[in-house]
Image (cartoon, grey):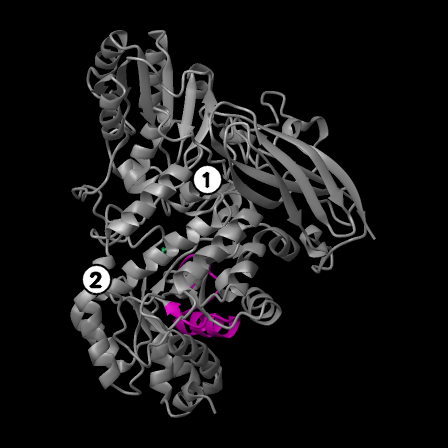
């Protein structure tokens, strides 16, 4: 019998019940936490350093001597710890279309998480960002299931390492399972009206890839699918995840999901009812559900729940703890010097540079010659705008006014640093706050603009406007910023706009009146520097959008993988196409595609890509396919491969992509994933827009 099965056999009912609970340290405080540790609780979240160590010392001496598991929200680095490296958010990193880079970031983050004595990170987010009203789009890898799956699996591998028991390996926890970002109205934790077929077709693939990458844990979403809460959906948690996908890690609920069944979703009468429902549906660990402990004891005593039902959940948790070496070394910890170390800061700069997306350029960039530059706007010199959510500024430790910790480089600081080298002078006027005017701000900014040759306008939102439980119905720039931009346009000066934002905002006026537009969403400690380096041409930007920018909130859904069938294919008052499409990203050079061929026998695509400009650069080549006739309606195009290729000026390279039949599959009306015979179209190019894609037809027998 395996060691963990032996342990479960010898555990008391109380110890089993406690093992299934995850307690939030910050909420219960030291006293109560130590009591839970003596009782044999399975896990804590949001505890760090010495507080964690002290609890572990108690746990291993108590009851069944089962080591504690410590979970933390380290979602783009271990950013709740001020000493840690704040990497770009997932949405920002996704602009690099670079799984290897994301894996390296996760490896670095794992070292910093483990340096704090912690074992599990509630990351990656594998939800899709398809509705910009939702407050958590920044936490996603964007709108596409293929890209989210490739990057999510890479992140899991980075966190968990080759050897899970190594000091530098931590458990990944893919979240939020499932369809959380698809809720009606973009509303956080609200109901998602989709079918299981749609789930398997569009939202499950990223989780499948994460499970194949060895995922240790997965988090049940707050919301519900067509009226059934994810927390009480046995088909979702047992049949699809544990049986069909063969997931062998453990399922942890999101924050208080068990009591939400009573309070928010009204599918359970009381704590006993909710606890039984959560356990029987396939949740193994109950986050912030202290009431679950007593409830389960009562349920077993009254015979409503059999003790064996706890065993399956306890076994999954202990198996993962064993796999990650916690029984061998409950105090496993990476070297504390990893926190914010030079190597991680260098990697952070590299990622920031790979993630800059040039969306418009009338030729003014890269800046040349002696220029008097005015930097204006509320996002230019506030590092909090570059950080996104889940850092020491944000929840769960509400501390938005805390002082930022160096090192970091804001856009203004980056422009000032590079202006010296480029014989330029720099003025700065904030002009307005993110979401309110500054007295005389517009006048001051206009006056400064009149003296300048060019304006760099830094605008966007922040996590007071976009976060968990913070959705927006109108996703334009806040009014104060729209007014400031309008006044700047009236000066007639050329404007380079840097969108420093958590997610795509509806900015048609910015596109219409800026001579250039760049973004890297929330680029982390060095996001500002990377934008400045792109403006001065120190780097040749080559990021691509992992998500579409709508013209207007009402234009959604405007993701690229639309279904056919919309009559007249546009609104009477709005075009069909988004302002900026998925996959878009310009460069200071240009690339030509030619000699595309597809061998239907070997399913191999060949295409030639040439750098036909004057500068070396990189191109993220994208491959899409369409199933010409299918048993259910399928998208007009779907991403099926991508690859970044570095090309010197003039250089060309033949790229080869080999596929398998399952790459061209769909989920049919019987909810089964199949590849149907028939005609297919494969397309390749540097962005998802039709006009630029090379195409080939082929047939699968
Ligand atoms: C939060 C979030 C989840 C996070 C968890 C623990 O409410 O929904 O993403 O990991 O609770 O903080």
Q: Element type at marker 1?
A: loop
Q: Nearer the viewer, residue 40 or 61?
A: 61
Q: Position of residue 566 (x, y in %)?
A: 70, 33
- Residue 260 screen position, x and y as percent: 41, 61
Residue 700: image location, x then y, percent? 80, 50
The verdict on residue 406 being magenta is no
Task: Tell me where residue 106 sits by quadrant.
Answer: bottom left
Residue 554 placement, left or right of 188: right
Which picture quadrant has residue 440?
Answer: top left
Residue drawn at (30%, 77%) of the image: 41
The magenta stretch is 262-286
Return the residue at label 2: 336
Tag 2 secondary structure = helix
Q: Horizontal and vertical percent for residue 276?
A: 46, 75
| Of pointers 1 and 2, the one earlier in the residue sequence | 1
Other residues around mark 1 within 10 Å, as few (<14) / some (14–19) / many (≥20): many
Residue 212, image quadrant: bottom right
Viewer-proximal residue among 182 and 64: 64
Spatial separation of the CA atoms under disc 1 and disc 2: 31 Å
Return the mark for residue 95: 1
Is residue 466 something that shows in the picture?
no
Quadrant containing ligand 1: bottom left
């Amino acid at each position: 019998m395996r060691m963990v099965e032996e342990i479960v056999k010898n555990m008391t009912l109380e110890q089993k019940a406690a093992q299934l609970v995850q307690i939030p340290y910050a909420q219960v405080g030291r006293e109560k936490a130590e009591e839970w540790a003596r009782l044999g609780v399975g896990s804590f979240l949001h505890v760090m350093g010495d507080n964690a160590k002290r609890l572990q010392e108690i746990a291993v001496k108590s009851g069944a001597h089962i080591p504690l598991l410590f979970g933390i929200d380290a979602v783009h680095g271990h950013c709740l710890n001020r000493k840690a490296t704040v990497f770009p958010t997932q949405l920002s990193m996704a602009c690099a279309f670079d799984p290897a880079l994301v894996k390296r970031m996760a490896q670095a983050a794992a070292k910093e998480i483990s340096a704090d004595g912690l074992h599990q990170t509630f990351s990656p987010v594998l939800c899709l960002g398809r509705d910009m009203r939702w407050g958590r789009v920044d936490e996603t890898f964007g709108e596409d299931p293929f890209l989210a799956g490739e990057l999510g699996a890479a992140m899991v591998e980075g966190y968990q390492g080759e050897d899970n028991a190594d000091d530098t390996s931590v458990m990944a926890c893919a979240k939020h399972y499932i369809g959380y970002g698809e809720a009606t109205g973009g509303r956080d934790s609200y109901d998602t009206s989709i079918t299981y077929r749609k789930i398997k077709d569009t939202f499950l693939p990223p989780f499948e890839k994460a499970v194949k990458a060895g995922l240790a844990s997965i988090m049940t979403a707050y919301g519900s699918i067509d009226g059934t809460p994810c927390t009480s959906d046995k088909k979702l948690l047992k049949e699809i995840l544990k049986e069909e996908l063969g997931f062998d890690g453990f399922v942890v609920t999101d924050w208080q999901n068990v009591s939400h069944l009573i309070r928010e979703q009204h599918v359970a009468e009381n704590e006993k009812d909710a606890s039984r429902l959560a356990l029987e549906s396939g949740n193994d660990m109950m986050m912030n559900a202290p009431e679950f402990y007593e409830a389960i004891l009562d349920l077993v005593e009254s015979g409503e729940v059999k003790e064996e039902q706890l065993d399956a959940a306890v076994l999954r948790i202990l198996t993962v703890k064993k796999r990650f070496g916690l029984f061998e070394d409950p105090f496993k910890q990476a070297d504390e010097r990893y926190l914010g170390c030079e190597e991680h800061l260098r990697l952070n700069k590299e990622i920031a540079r790979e993630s800059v997306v040039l969306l418009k350029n009338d030729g003014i960039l890269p800046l040349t010659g002696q220029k008097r530059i005015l930097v204006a706007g509320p996002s230019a010199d506030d590092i909090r705008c570059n950080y996104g959510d889940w850092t020491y500024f944000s929840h769960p430790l509400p501390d938005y006014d805390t002082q930022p910790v160096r090192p970091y480089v804001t856009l203004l600081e980056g422009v000032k640093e590079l202006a010296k080298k480029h014989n330029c002078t720099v003025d700065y006027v904030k002009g307005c706050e993110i979401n309110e005017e500054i007295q005389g701000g517009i006048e001051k900014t206009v006056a400064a603009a009149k003296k300048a040759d060019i304006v760099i306008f830094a605008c966007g939102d922040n996590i007071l406007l976009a976060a968990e439980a913070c959705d927006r119905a109108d996703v334009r720039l806040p009014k104060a910023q729209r007014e400031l931009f309008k006044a700047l346009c009236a000066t007639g000066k050329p404007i380079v706009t840097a969108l420093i934002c958590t997610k795509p905002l509806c900015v048609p006026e910015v596109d219409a009146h800026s001579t250039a537009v760049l973004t890297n969403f929330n680029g982390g400690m060095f996001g500002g520097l990377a934008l400045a380096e792109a403006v001065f041409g120190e780097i040749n930007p080559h990021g691509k959008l992992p998500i579409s920018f709508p013209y207007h909130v009402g234009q959604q859904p405007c993701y690229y993988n639309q279904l056919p069938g919309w009559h007249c294919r546009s609104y009477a008052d709005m075009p069909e196409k988004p302002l900026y499409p998925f996959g878009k990203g310009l460069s200071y050079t240009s690339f030509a595609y030619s000699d595309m061929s597809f061998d239907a026998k070997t399913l191999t695509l060949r295409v030639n890509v040439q750098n036909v400009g004057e500068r070396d650069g990189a191109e993220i080549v994208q491959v899409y396919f369409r199933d010409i006739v299918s048993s259910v309606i399928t998208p007009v195009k779907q991403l099926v491969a991508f690859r970044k290729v570095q090309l010197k000026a003039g250089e060309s390279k033949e790229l080869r992509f080999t596929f398998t039949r399952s790459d061209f599959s769909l989920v049919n009306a019987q909810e089964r994933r199949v590849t149907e015979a028939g005609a297919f179209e494969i397309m390749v190019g540097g962005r998802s827009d039709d006009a630029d894609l090379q195409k080939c037809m082929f047939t699968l027998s």
